């Protein structure tokens, strides 16, 4: 039988910190620093391979220690904002179950470590390891294992003066006498190591000028074996805040260092690159930008000076606040404090069986931190941010076409005959926050490129940046930034403070939303119609912020949980001509409350009989039954009570979700996310009239390698059985669970319900 849970997808990005947060190993593994983890990524398989956890703060820099014999690396160095270096050692295959990994902390810096490099000075990897680390305390420390041997070295450095300097460091057996000639020579800085006879001379070999802004990273191409020995190419890669990455090589005839290749970003709202790396064989280069995005380029086989963008992992660069599956379970959409909304979907390449997940669209790039979202049908969603407005978006034609190409789903199944009236894409006007629809006719007029036309202000800052592209694979970062926006079709005004939560009913006819509040008049829930986008009703009960809203699967009830430690249940009544009206039918107060702290999350069972609440007090409680035959508020209030014993989750509960599918023996499957990042799967079934401990069964507690590093923000089960993108979508064996957290990660888990 298969394992109960396996990691299907991890979406994250590199940290916004310079100093070498990305490193490429000769074994093909790409290492980069995330929130508190070192993520190991396999570019060939396009998936994350492992997460190494040991730092107590942000990981600022990582570096593989390259072996002189050309074998795959077994040691990795990382430095973080927790002021320490960690030397990671392991033997064998790197997997998510990294219990065999040994971590050795190196402490000495008094401020955050921002750069690190390492080198073996002998053919024996267990001997003569030198590590150089730089920190914000303005110090560079040299760490040595079992001594070291002296040899000639070239050292490349970069700085905020936009220049790159190459230094030659060589040993001298003795100080030669000065010759009295008139030849011009480079000045040597000579020094002798204390208590030894070793003398070193440092000379400035060359100065490279080509960048127009601060140069944040410079790296040598890795050495490679040739004719029985290791050869070091004279080739340098540099990354700058001018949005470019440059490959430098000395001219074969003159020896002068020249720019050979320049790649980078065009357009978008980015601020350049922090770091870059060669692949072990020099055929690919990777860089990470200010917002954490990774960029990968591959060298063409025919024209060696032509480099093309490749598919690479991507994700949020700040806390991910909410995640939702589309109603058909083909993709997920997430929102985060990085002010973006991102769409991830599965990609199955031709002639390959493995399915990988990638970001294929960025529907919203906002000016406020995002907080929540809700799907309104397959290609429409509403989102809320740290503003008083709800914004509604609909997928453009270009996205639907590209989604069809990437996912393999025919266009006929994705859209109706009305798709011909959809806009091609969207663009954000200068100084605007709203995504403006771009139709086919809007792109027909192109300005002429003569000098006079370009000098006009309107053409230097064009209104339309969107360019439709037909894609067959996930788009690169440049395309995600400006060509995958969704048009904004509606704004909903009515709240007095920043939006905090939003939900849509299962028939996609109604939206419920709430905002941050410290008084009862501001904590009201507003109901909106999705057909007229008009306000239907205001539901006032809570005294503080409503933290989550959830419609029951049968759309008869609306559940709200709040910071005031209470929940309220609202029942639908189809009695008015203007539409359904909700009235409060049950609630908890100071006298009847079971939770003693903020209730962060809630959800419904698939039969709409029970609902679940999770709180900061570490308690998880299932309430019920919600009987539609009860007509009066008093009877309903008395009938809804805890149906389970109080489950102690061990830490503050920040997210709960119940699967729409049951176990083979008819038990509800409950996922609980904690503030410490752990995710626990339980099953529950009421066995008698009174709650009993046996009703709860703990099935799976995720280990550290699968869990989040910080608080779980949201959990969301896929409503359908099977795995998205696979051929087993009608299989009753697999379920999928999406999660997001404050560690910047979005994860998708494959859950074998037969093994629970």
Image: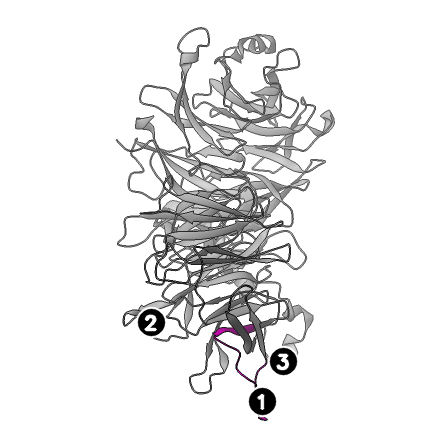
Closer to the N terminus: mark 2 or mark 1? 1
Query: Magenta span has 174?
Result: yes
> Does the magenta stretch mainly form a helix, a strand or a loop?
loop
Q: Within 10 angstroms of label 2, few (less than 14), some, or many (20 or more) residues?
A: few
What's the distance in space between the residues labelled 2 and 1, CA to CA?
A: 43 Å
| Residue 114 place in picture, x, y as percent | 57, 55
Magenta stretch in the rendered image:
165-187
Q: Quadrant of the N terminus?
A: top left
* Position of 551 relative to 84 (above/below): above
* Position of 394 relative to 288 (above/below): above
| Residue 5 place in picture, x, y as percent | 36, 33
Judge left or right: residue 123 versus residue 296. left
Q: Within 10 angstroms of label 1, few (less than 14), some, or many (20 or more) residues?
A: few
* Residue drawn at (49%, 74%) of the image: 170
Name the mark nearer the viewer: 1 or 3.
1
Q: Quadrant of the C terminus?
A: top left
| Residue 752 place in picture, x, y as percent | 33, 31
Q: Determine which residue is flagged by label 2.
A: 301
**Mark 2 in CB contact with mark 1 (< 8 angstroms):** no
Closer to the N terminus: mark 3 or mark 2? 2
Q: Secondary structure at mark 3?
A: helix
What's the distance in space between the residues labelled 1 and 3, CA to CA?
A: 47 Å
* Residue drawn at (57%, 82%) of the image: 186
Name the mark nearer the viewer: 2 or 1.
1
Which mark, by number, is residue 451?
3
Q: Is residue 441 visible?
A: yes
Q: Determine which residue is flagged by label 1.
A: 184
What's the distance in space between the residues labelled 3 and 2, CA to CA?
A: 37 Å
Nearest the eye: 64 or 175: 175
């Amino acid at each position: 039988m298969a394992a109960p849970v396996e990691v299907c997808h991890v979406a994250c990005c590199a940290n916004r910190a310079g100093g070498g947060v990305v490193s490429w190993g000769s074994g093909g593994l790409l290492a980069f620093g995330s929130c508190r983890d070192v993520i190991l990524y396999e570019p060939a398989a396009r998936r994350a391979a492992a997460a190494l956890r040991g730092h107590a703060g942000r990981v600022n820099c990582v570096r593989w220690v390259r072996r002189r014999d050309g074998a795959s690396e077994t040691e990795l160095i990382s430095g973080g904002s927790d002021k320490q270096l960690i030397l990671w050692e392991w033997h064998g295959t790197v997997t998510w179950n990294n219990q065999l990994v040994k971590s050795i902390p190196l402490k000495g810096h008094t401020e955050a470590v921002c750069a690190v490099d390492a080198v073996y000075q002998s053919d024996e990897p267990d001997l003569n390891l030198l590590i150089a680390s730089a920190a914000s305390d303005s110090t560079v420390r040299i760490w040595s294992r079992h001594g070291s041997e002296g040899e000639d070295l070239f050292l490349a450095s970069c700085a905020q003066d936009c220049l790159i300097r190459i230094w030659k460091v060589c040993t001298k057996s003795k100080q030669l006498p000065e010759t009295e000639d008139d030849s011009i020579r480079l000045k040597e800085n000579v020094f002798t190591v204390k208590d030894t006879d070793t003398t070193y001379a440092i000379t400035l070999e060359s100065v490279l000028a080509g960048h127009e802004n601060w140069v944040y990273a410079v790296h040598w191409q890795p050495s490679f074996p040739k004719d029985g020995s290791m050869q070091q190419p004279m080739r340098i890669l540099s990354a700058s805040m001018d949005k470019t990455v440059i490959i430098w090589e000395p001219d074969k005839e003159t020896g002068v260092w020249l720019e050979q290749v320049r790649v980078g970003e065009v357009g978008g709202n980015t601020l350049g690159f922090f770091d870059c790396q060669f692949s072990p064989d020099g055929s690919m280069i990777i860089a990470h930008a200010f917002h954490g995005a990774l960029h990968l380029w591959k060298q063409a086989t025919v024209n060696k000076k032509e480099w093309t963008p490749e598919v690479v992992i991507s994700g949020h660069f700040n806390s991910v606040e909410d995640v939702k599956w589309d109603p058909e379970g083909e993709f997920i959409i997430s929102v985060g404090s990085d002010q973006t909304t991102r769409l991830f979907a599965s990609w199955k390449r031709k002639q390959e069986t493995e399915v990988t997940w990638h970001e294929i669209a960025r529907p919203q790039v906002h000016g406020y931190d995002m907080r929540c979202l809700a799907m309104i049908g397959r290609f429409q969603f509403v989102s809320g941010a740290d503003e008083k407005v709800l914004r509604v978006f609909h997928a453009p034609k270009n996205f639907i076409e590209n989604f069809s190409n990437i996912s393999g789903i025919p266009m006929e199944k994705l859209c109706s005959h009305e798709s011909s009236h959809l806009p091609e894409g969207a663009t954000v006007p200068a100084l605007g926050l709203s995504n403006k629809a771009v139709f086919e006719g809007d792109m027909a007029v192109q300005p002429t490129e003569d000098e006079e036309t370009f000098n006009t202000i309107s053409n230097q800052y064009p209104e339309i940046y969107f360019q439709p592209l037909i894609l067959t694979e996930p788009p690169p970062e440049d395309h995600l930034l400006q060509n995958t926006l969704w048009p904004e079709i509606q704004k909903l005004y009515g709240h007095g403070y920043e939006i905090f939560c939003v939900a849509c009913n299962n028939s996609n006819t109604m939206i419920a939303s709430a905002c941050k509040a410290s008084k009862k008049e501001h904590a009201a829930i507003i109901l909106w119609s999705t057909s007229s986008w008009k306000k239907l009703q205001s539901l006032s009960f809570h005294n503080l912020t409503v933290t989550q809203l959830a419609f029951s699967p049968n759309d008869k009830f609306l559940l709200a949980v709040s910071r005031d430690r209470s929940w309220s249940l609202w029942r639908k009544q189809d009695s008015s001509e203007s539409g359904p009206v909700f009235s409060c039918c049950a609630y908890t107060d100071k006298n009847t409350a079971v939770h003693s702290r903020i209730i962060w999350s809630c959800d419904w069972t698939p039969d709409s009989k029970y609902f679940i609440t999770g709180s900061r007090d570490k308690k998880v409680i299932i309430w019920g039954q919600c009987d539609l035959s009860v007509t009066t508020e008093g009877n309903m209030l008395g009938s809804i009570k805890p149906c389970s014993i109080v489950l102690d989750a061990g830490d503050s509960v920040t997210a709960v979700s119940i699967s729409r599918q049951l176990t083979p023996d008819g038990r509800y499957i409950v996922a609980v996310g904690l503030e410490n990042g752990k995710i626990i799967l339980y099953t529950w079934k009421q066995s008698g009239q009174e709650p009993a401990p046996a009703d709860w069964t703990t099935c799976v507690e995720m280990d550290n390698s699968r869990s989040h590093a910080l608080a779980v923000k949201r959990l969301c089960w896929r409503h359908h059985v099977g795995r998205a993108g696979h051929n087993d979508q009608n299989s009753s064996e697999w379920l999928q669970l999406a999660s997001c957290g404050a560690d910047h990660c979005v994860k998708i888990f494959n859950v074998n319900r037969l093994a629970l």
